[in-house]
Image (cartoon, rainbow, N blue to C red):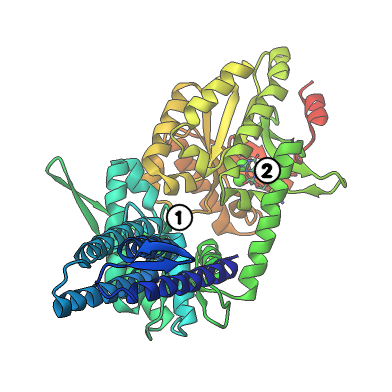
Amino acid sequence: MNGLQNKQKKIGLFLSVLAIFVVSSFCMRYDGKPKTVDFLGIEILNVSLMGVCQSIIYLLAILMVCIDYKIGKTISILILIILDIRSVIIIALTGNYGPLPGVVNGLISIFSILLISTFFAKAEKAKYTDELTGALNKSGFLKEVDRLIDKGKFRYVIFLKLKNFRSISDRLGHDYGDAALKTMTERMKEVVSDDGIVCRIDGTEFAIGVHGYIGAGKLCTRLIDRISECLEFTIDEASVKCYINAFAGVASYPDDASDSKTLLKYADIAMYNVKEKHTSNIGYFNANALNRITKQVETVRLIKDSLENNYFYLVYQPQYTVQDKKLRGFETLIRCKLPNQTIVSPGDFIPVAEQTDLIQKIDEYVLERAMREFKPVLEKTGGKYIISVNVSAKSMSDKDFVDKLALMLEKTGFPPYALEIEITEYSLAESREQTIENVTVLRKLGIHIALDDFGTGYTSLAQLVNLPINVLKIDKSLIDDINSKDSAIELIEAVIYMGHLMDCYIISEGVEKQEQVDILKKHKCDFIQGYVWGKPMDYEEALKLVK
Ligand code: C2E
Ligand code: CA
Ligand code: CA
C-alpha cells in the first residue's frame, strides 16, 4: 500500500515538473516587448499569454506541494526564482518595465507556496506527534524507524511499560498523571540523547528506536534507573513523592525482524514476557516469547467465546466447621466446558484473563451467576449458608466495583450477609487505597471479606492489618506439611492465633487427610475446605448437600 502510494507520488511529481518546464519554456521566449504572437493559429498578445503561463506554473507549483510538500516546495520555488531573475535581467537590460507585474506575481506565488508548505509541515507534525508529551506517536515512530532502516542506520527497538503508574493517577488525579508522563518522556529523551528516538505509543507505553552504538542492555538499565528516580510534586505546599518503575523489551534489527511494525510488536512481546515472569525488568525477544504470546492470544479468544456463548459454569466446594463438620457454605469455582465437551480449568485461563480487562467480566459473571443460583436455596433454608466468590485484584481495586456489586445484590435480591468475597493481597499491590476503601464499604454492607491464599504472598503484616477483612484462608502450601513436620504445625498454630487476634475466622484450604483435620481441630481452626470432606461439585450435587 505504502509502496504504491510512493510510486504514485513520484509519477505525479515527475509529470508536474515536466509540465512546469514546458510552460516555463514559453515564458523564456518573452523578451519584455509587447507584441502579438500566433498561438495555435490565434493571434494573442504575448503579455496576456505570459500571464496565463504564470498562472499555470503557480497552479503546478501548488500541485507539487500537495503531492510532497518538501520536494514540491524546493522545486517550485527554484523555478519561480529563475523566472523572476530572468525578468529582472530583462528589465535591467532593456529599461522596459513591462515584465515587472510578472516579477511581483512570482514573489507572491513564492510567498503563497511557503505559507502552504508551512501549513502542511505543521499538519504532518501533528499527525506524527503525541499531543500530551510532544514525543513521536506510534505512526511517527514507525515512519521514522522505516526511514532509518532504509538508510541502513538502525539497530533495535525498546518497548517500555511504566509500572505503578496507576497509583499516581488514582491518588493525585489525572493532571498529576499527565505531568508525570511528561516528566518521564523528558527523562527518556535525556537518556537516549542522540542515539535514538522516543515515542509514546499509548497510555503508559513507550518505544525507543535506537540507531546509535550503545548496547541494548546498558541503555535499558539507564532508562529504567532514570525512570525509577523519585518524582516530587508540590501539592498545597506539601511535597508528595512518587516512585515509578518500568519493564523493557528489546527486539533487534535485522536478527529479530526487518520492518518497524514487526520490531515494535516483538519488543512488546519481549516486554510482556518479562513482566509476566517477575524475575527481571529487561527482556529480549525470542521464539519462546512468541509461542507464549500465541498461546495467550488463543486463550483470550477462548475467554471471549466462553463469555459470549455461555461456556462458563460454576462448581461449588463445601466448607465445614472443623469441630462438628457442619456445612458452612461453598466456595464457587469457575469452569469452562467447550462444545467438544473438554473442560478447561481456571488455572489455564484466569492468569491470562488477569492480564486483560476480561477478568472483570469474569468476576461479574461469577458473582451474578452465584447469586442467582443460590438465592432460592437460601430462601428455602433460611439463609444460613455463605457463598464465597473469588474476585480478582483488578476488580477489587476498581473504584466502580462497589456500585456494580450493590446493583447486582439489588437485581438478584441476594442477601449481602450470605455473600463472601475472596480477595488476595495482590489487590493491595494494584491500588492500596482504593482496595481498602472498597473492602471497608463492602464490610459495612454486611458482606464477608476473606483473604485468600494466606501465607503465599509478600505483603507486610502491618499492611494486612489495615485491611478490614473478617476471614483468613490459610493456603494449601502451609497445610500440606502439618502431618509430617513439627515446624509446620507450629507455624499453623501461630497463624491461627494471629488470625483470631485480627478478629478473623480461619479457613484451612486444601485439607486432604484426616490427620490434618485432627491437628487443625486441636489448634482451633474454624473451618475446613478440602478434598478430605468434599471436592468441588456441580450445582445439583451442592443442592443435595444442602438438603
Ligand atoms: P483458589 O481460590 O485458591 O481455589 C482453591 C483451589 O484449590 C481450587 O482449584 C480447588 O479445586 C483446589 N482445591 C480445594 N481443595 C483442594 C484439595 O484438598 N487438594 C487439592 N489438590 N486442591 C484443592 P481450582 O478450582 O482449579 O481453582 C484454581 C484457582 O483459580 C483458584 O484458586 C482461584 O485463584 C482461581 N479461580 C477459580 N475460580 C475463580 C473465579 O470464579 N474467579 C476468579 N477470579 N478466580 C477463580
Ligand atoms: Ca479462593
Ligand atoms: Ca486459595
What element does badge 2 sit on?
helix
Q: Is 21 left or right of 383, judged from the image as shown?
A: left
Residue appearing at x 51%, y 68% in the figure: 12
Residue 335 seen in this snapshot: yes
Residue found at x 73% / y 43%: 305
Place of residue 363 in the rendered image (x, y in percent of width and height, measured from the top left): 60, 37
Q: Nearer the viewer, residue 500 or 467?
A: 467
- Distance (Cα) linking label 1 and label 2: 27 Å
Task: Report which residue position mark 1 lands on.
Answer: 458
Mark 2 nearby-residue class (10 Å; few <14, some 14–19, many ≥20): many
Secondary element at image label 1: loop
Q: Tell which quarter ligand 3 is in.
A: top right
Q: Give the camera-side residue of 298 and 147.
A: 147
Residue furthest to the right in view is 340
Q: In the rendered image of this protein, does residue 163 appear above or below residue 428? A: below
Q: Which residue is mark 2?
A: 517
- Picture layout, residue 237 above or below residue 279: above
Snapshot quadrant of residue 525: top right
Percent x, y of residue 501: 43, 37
Mark 1 or mark 2, earlier in chain: 1
**Label 1 crowd (10 A; few <14 / some 14-19 / many >=20):** few
Q: Residue at x 51, y 33 (%)?
A: 449
